[in-house]
Image: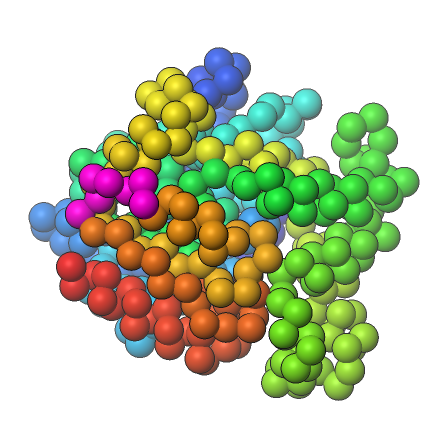
Amino acid sequence: MTGRRDYEIFEAGNFVLQSGAVFPAMNLAYKTYGALNSAKDNVILYPTSFSAQHFDTEWLIGPDGVLDPTSYFIIIPNLFGNGLSSSPSNSGNEPFPQLTYHDAVAVQHRLLTERFGITKLALVYGWSMGGMQAYHWAALHPDMVERAAVVCGSARCAPYNYVFLEAVKAALSGDPAFRDGRFVERPVAGYRAMGRVYAGWAMSHGFYRDELWREAGFTSLEDYLVRAWDATFARRDANDLLAQISIWQTGDISRCAAFGGDLDRALGAIKAHMLLMPGATDRYFDVRDNEDELGRLVNAKSAVLHPIPSLHGHRAGNPVNNPRDRAFLKAEIAELLNK
């Protein structure tokens, strides 16, 4: 768990999970930016992505950023399993229970309504696992969500996406530190193996073909892999990573009592202005999944599919050091917020 405490904790108490199990003393870590207006209608919810904590994603927030805190009250809720909100590394729960996006949205909803009295969201914005949460929000609280931006995300984890995550899990858990279903110490080799697997999936064929890693100052392909990927996941507890992968793999907006596994029914419940922004070269959140979903958003106020024209694969949706892709996101979100 990080020592940087620049966030607040919402204590959800003994929370009944979607599975029916009770999670004792569940905590949701969050940070806010900007000011809530008197009407409480200038709220942007910005859930975190895989392994990210709020300070990993707040680069996107600023007066000249994609999300403007001078106009909006922005809340970043940290997803369970990220080491700040309830996670294997900080909860003491063994074995750690199966959590879902539905659980995450339920606690986030309590945070908004109980702590802030918020009943309307101007926008739910999310990338990757954050995008899947944005989709869940739009389906589960259609009268609350005015707009949703799903960036490199989908309504459910596709089979191909699931298989990618199986490779990630196998690489990480192949380390001898993984015993009896959990990590008993830091898996040094496992972290590196996971990073190498991720490097091949997260970026596109064209990214490597055109040696775009040189634009970030790397001197060789090996230099890029070592400095950009080998230690990327070592900053997180390995059991936390497995918990988040489990949430990701079981992600499906229709997998709940309200929709009974009927994806058409779940997508049809959405009333928001929907912006689907897959990466044009994303390998595991494929454009075709969003294309299929688009035609099922029959009750949305509007629904558009605008792929990010980039060779940066999945990372096109998180362009920290990529001005071109960042400008694309900023323009698209500005247009969405004007609807």
In which quarter of the view is residue 239 placed?
top right
Name which residue lies at 30% across and 67% down: 332
Tell me which colouring the rendered structure shows. rainbow
Which residue is depicted at the point 79% across and 47% down? 171
Q: In terms of depth relative to the viewer, which is nearer, 176 or 297? A: 297
Where is residue 320 shown, x and y percent of the image?
50, 71
Q: Is residue 63 left or right of residue 3?
A: left
Q: What is the quadrant of residue 328 in the picture?
A: bottom left
Q: For residue 158, what is the image quadrant?
A: top right
Q: Is residue 135 left or right of residue 237?
A: left
Q: Position of residue 111 (x, y in %)?
A: 32, 36
Give x and y (percent) for residue 300: 22, 44
**Hey, which residue is sitting farthest left in the picture?**
39
- Which quadrant would the C terminus be assigned to in this image? bottom left
35 in magenta? no
The answer to whether one can see residue 8 in this image is no
Mark yes or no: residue 161 visible.
yes
Left-right relation of 234 to 158? right
Q: Position of residue 42 (x, y in %)?
A: 18, 54
Q: Residue sitting at 85 percent across and 52 percent down? A: 189
Query: Compared with residue 293, is residue 209 higher up or lower down, i.e. above or below?
Result: below
Residue 154 vertical placement versus 318 (above, below): above
8 or 18: nearer the viewer: 18
Q: Is 216 drawn above or below residue 257 in the view shown?
A: below
The mark tally for this picture is 0
SS assignment for the magenta stretch, majority: loop
Residue 300, magenta (yes or no): yes
Q: Which residues are magenta?
A: 295-301
Seen as rendered, the residue at the extreme right is 176
Q: Which one is nearer the viewer's eye here, 142 or 209?
A: 209
